[in-house]
Amino acid sequence: MRRVNKVLCAMSGGVDSSVAATLLKQQNFDVVGIFFETQKYTKKRLNQHKNNAKRVCDKLDIPFYIFDVSKKFKQEVIDYFILEYEAGRTPNPCVVCNKKIKFKHLVNIAKKLKCDKIATGHYARIKRKRQNAKCKTTTKNSKLYQLLKCKDKKKDQSYFLWQLTRRQLSKIIFPLGDYTKSEVKKLAKRFKLPINTKEESQDVCFIPSVDRTEFMRTHAEKLTKSGNVVDKAGNVLGRHKGLCYYTIGQRKNLGGNLKFKISNLKFDKRRPKKVFVVELDISKNQLIAGEEKDLYSKIVEADKLNWIRTGQPKAGLIINAKIRYAHKSARCKIIKVNKGQIKVKFNKPQRAISPGQSIVFYQKDKLLGGAIIK
């Protein structure tokens, strides 16, 4: 009789992790649920999710643990988020959270609870490469594991997982990798799980949308102060409401209050051109605006490279890359790699390349690695 593996499953109280745990239970895994307490100031919402997670675990008749990571979460994710904004970069907290909070603690807790694997509700897949018969490595060799996109390409979350290591991949199960989001919602209803299938997780979990302004005033007050909107030559076009409310490439809430008569941007007052955020100057509290053509570039330099694929990338390698989660993969060539630094050139200019975001490299569905855009 096959030994039943013990799996530690991260439970958020949402539809994805709840269905993931249920699927594991149906596959005869010995499932243990765990909920991470990440923030104290959103206690009401946190308790709601925690209660949902507990109800699902009770229904599945599996153990349920609560683990307080709020101190580490503030240090590693929230403080990072604020510091990045204060440096004029666009942070990606989900990428950092996955590396320094979620999977790091899951692996450590799994060891203590004697779990063989860990699981989450991420939409991604892990594949173990076939082993060459002549190869002396064992089937447990972590180098054999690959991270792939999921079945639902619109929902794929592999982009946020590029900082995982092959050793971590050998310990992870993604039960939703072969399902679409709509299929998962249908499964939740079929399983009669006590959750709201219509509720979606937020992009920034620690900032409720209704409290975003108050959060930024509390944690990064200087970024909420109004300042000048200028063109690339320094001519004043108008005023912004606070740099933390803008990202590179943004047009919304920008063009309506600008003076469309600046010669440098060749604006015609009768037929004004669209105006976009092209740069944020934190030191001068200035938002630099320009035309859409100013947003395009072929060259990307990045650091903190993590290469999941065996070996390291070499100059001349032609692959696909995404410069943000919602970005479509585009063809590029690696120009230079040196001590965690990477420089690539895209075949076609890419729009709104933002420092602080991740550039993630793919070969078809395989995620090769990633880095932080400089």
Image (cartoon, rainbow, N blue to C red):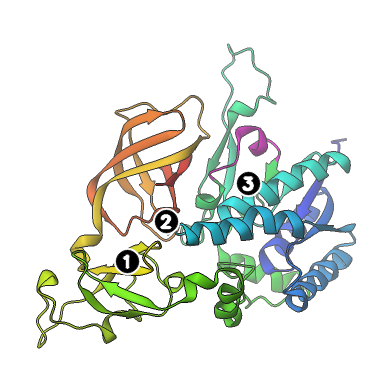
**Amino acid residing under circle 2:** Arg
Marks 1 and 3 in Cβ contact (< 8 Å): no
The image shows residue 48 at horizontal and vertical percentages of 78, 76
User: Residue at the spot x=84%, y=53% of the render?
Assistant: 32
**Amino acid residing under circle 3:** Lys
**Residue that carries the numbered disc 2 in the rendered image:** 324
**Residue that carries the numbered disc 3 in the rendered image:** 99
Q: CA distance from mark 2 to mark 3?
A: 17 Å
The image shows residue 325 at horizontal and vertical percentages of 45, 57
> Is residue 250 in view from this perspective?
yes
Label 2: element kind:
loop
In the drawing, does residue 229 fall left or right of residue 246? left
Q: In the drawing, what numbered circle is on residue 276?
A: none
* Res 234 → quadrant: bottom left
Closer to the chain start, of discs 2 and 1, is 1
Q: CA distance from mark 2 to mark 1?
A: 12 Å
Badge 2: few (under 14), some or many (20 or more) residues near its Cα, within 10 Å? some
The image shows residue 4 at horizontal and vertical percentages of 85, 41
| Residues drawn in magenta | 162-171
Against 12, residue 323 (above or below) is: above
Q: CA distance from mark 1 to mark 3?
A: 28 Å
Against 38, residue 55 (above or below) is: below
Q: Magenta stretch: dominant SS? A: loop
Q: In the drawing, what numbered circle is on residue 249?
A: 1
Residue 182 inside the magenta-drawn segment: no
* Res 132 → quadrant: top right
Closer to the chain start, of discs 1 and 3, is 3
